[in-house]
Amino acid sequence: MAEPLAQGSFALLVNVKDFTTDVKDTLRKAVLEALKTVAEALLSDSRAYVPVLTGDLLRSGRVEVIRHHKRFGTDQVRVVYGREQVIIYAETQHEDPYNHPSLGFFGAAKYLTQPWQANLAFYQALFELVLFREMRRAA
């Protein structure tokens, strides 16, 4: 299966050389929790944009956590639509602006990109809120 297209990302660069192992582990867990929370919000928001004919594409949406991603070397959280049988359909529907009468308008392409761009400030604030909450909780 092809690697899904990246539609947006958060990057957090922290110099952890002077951190204890406990602090590093707490920070990693807090970042992962914040990323999962943002991904769930994006998944929820994106459902309003997903074209619906049979509902298979809409039902296939999920948040995936990849521990120690082989390409990036860190945990990765992503929002994915499509399973084996609908992955090509999911990509085509996302990239090409078809007429989707079920939504009542032309388009509905970029069903992940549109809510990401429209709500980026909210997602950033949500990430920070959850990150700091998790760090305080662990202290």
Image (cartoon, helix red, strand yellow):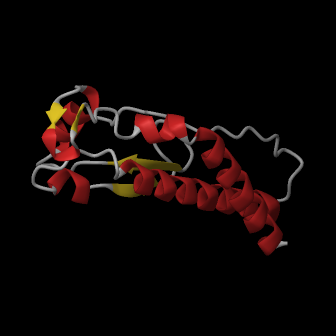
Most extreme residue toward the top is: 96
Percent x, y of residue 136: 82, 69
Residue 133 placement: quadrant? bottom right
Is residue 93 visible to the viewer in this orientation of the structure? yes
Identify whether 115 is placed above or below 42.
Answer: above
Left or right of 32 on screen, residue 51: left
State which quarter of the image contains the C terminus: bottom right
State which quarter of the image contains the N terminus: top left
Identify whether 43 is placed above or below 3.
Answer: below
Q: Residue at x 27, y 27 (%)?
A: 95
Percent x, y of residue 114: 43, 36
Percent x, y of residue 112: 39, 40
Left or right of 126 on screen, residue 14: right
Residue 108 placement: quadrant? top left
Left or right of 39 on screen, residue 89: left
Q: Could you say which is closer to the camera, residue 62 or residue 120?
A: 120
Q: Could you say which is closer to the camera, residue 47 or residue 11?
A: 47
Q: Could you say which is closer to the camera, residue 62 or residue 48?
A: 48
Most extreme residue toward the right is: 18
Q: Residue at x 42, y 57 (%)?
A: 44
Left or right of 42 on screen, residue 120: right
Q: Could you say which is closer to the camera, residue 27 or residue 60?
A: 60
Q: Residue at x 46, y 41 (%)?
A: 115
Q: Residue at x 78, y 60 (%)?
A: 132
Is residue 1 visible to the viewer in this orientation of the structure? no
